[in-house]
Image (tube, helix red, strand yellow):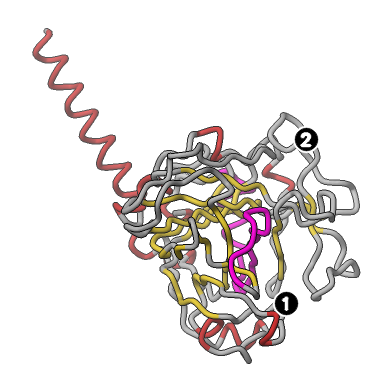
Amino acid sequence: MKKIGAVLASVALAVGLLFFGSVLAHPQEEALAQTSGGVGQFKGQCRPAGTSLNDPIVKPSTSNAHLHNFWGNMGVPSDPSVDTVNELLAQQTSCEDGSQDGGDPAYLRKNKSSYWMPQPYINGDALKPHGSGFYYSSKGGLDPTKTKVPPVGLKLIARHMSDPTSDAQAAEIDIACPAGTLTQSQKLPNGRDSTPAPGACKSSSNIDIAITFPECLEPATHLGPNGERIAHRAIDRGSAGAHCQADQRQIPTLQEFFTFDIPDNVGYYAGTSSLKVAGHDGPVAYNNIHADYFNAEDMTKLVEFCINRKNSFSPNCK
């Protein structure tokens, strides 16, 4: 009986590993793909699309521009004139369509969206963009059945919580070294930031930077200084009963997981004092970190099937 039991256990383990492997778009992104649970979620994978001074939301002058790393839309980092949703839709993308996961062709992605963040540095050395994972969910206490489709053409900016705009545009930022060591709590959209301890980020290693966007969209008449939509973190995010205000639209919580390679000459990581991001006059303090999102994808089917109906383990949602 013990022998039979061992055989059955081995078969179960093999089946489980086969299933888990089929979920991942790339084996090297395994750590990023293991995010916070499987209810009300769909995800995407996008390769790095380039690094440049472009920014189709803020559109800074040359003297005020700073370096960004881009994922997704290939036209945005290469051409500063690409700044409307129709122009994004005419470009190529580095994002996968989901066909590798064996889903229904009706759910294949046509994601021409652009995702970007300022170039990060450790002790003045630029980190090299590597992998990514983009997760759209309604977790952290939110009711997935209340989630609405985000508008095509939506522009959002998620800023560090120290920005003086209270909770408007407030990002949740979780960072870990080496890549793959973000804890389950860090991956949850719970309203708490986290950063690596001194000494954790070493030369010739890598780092995960996870940026969670606010999900409570204000009416279209409320715009930020660059014409972007204003969004707030859900009230009581991370607790049962998390919700948006009555006049706000609950859209999927966007979590961007970026992996960067750390150069071999980076030196000792002394905490966030060692971590900076690009500014127009060179690297600036860590709390200037932010992320931008320009949606160029109709997510109606994905939101209704994967989030509203909680089918996040379906191949259509991978």
Q: CA distance from mark 1 to mark 2?
A: 30 Å
Numbered disc total? 2
Residue 313: quadrant of the picture:
top left
User: Quadrant where the N terminus lies?
Assistant: top left
Name the element at disc 2: loop
Within-10-Å neighbours for mark 2: few <14, some 14–19, many 20+? some
Query: Which residue is at the front of the view, 232 or 245?
Result: 232
Which residue occupies the extreme top position in the image?
1
Q: Is residue 318 visible?
A: yes
**Residue behind mark 2:** 236
**Residue behind mark 1:** 58
Q: Is 200 on the left-hand or right-hand side of 120?
A: left
Badge 1 or badge 2: first in the primary sequence: 1
Residue 179 to residue 190: above or below: below
What percent of the width, then of the height, locates residue 249? 80, 55
Within-10-Å neighbours for mark 1: few <14, some 14–19, many 20+? some
- Frontmost of labels 1 and 2 is 1
Residue 290 to residue 147: above or below: below
Residue 238: quadrant of the picture:
top right
Which amino acid is tagged 1? Val
What percent of the width, then of the height, locates residue 173? 61, 48
Q: Is 14 on the left-hand or right-hand side of 81?
A: left
Magenta span of residues: 282-310
Name the element at disc 1: loop
Residue that appears at 35% across and 51% down = 203
Residue that appears at 55% across and 48% down = 41
Residue that appears at 72% across and 56% down = 148
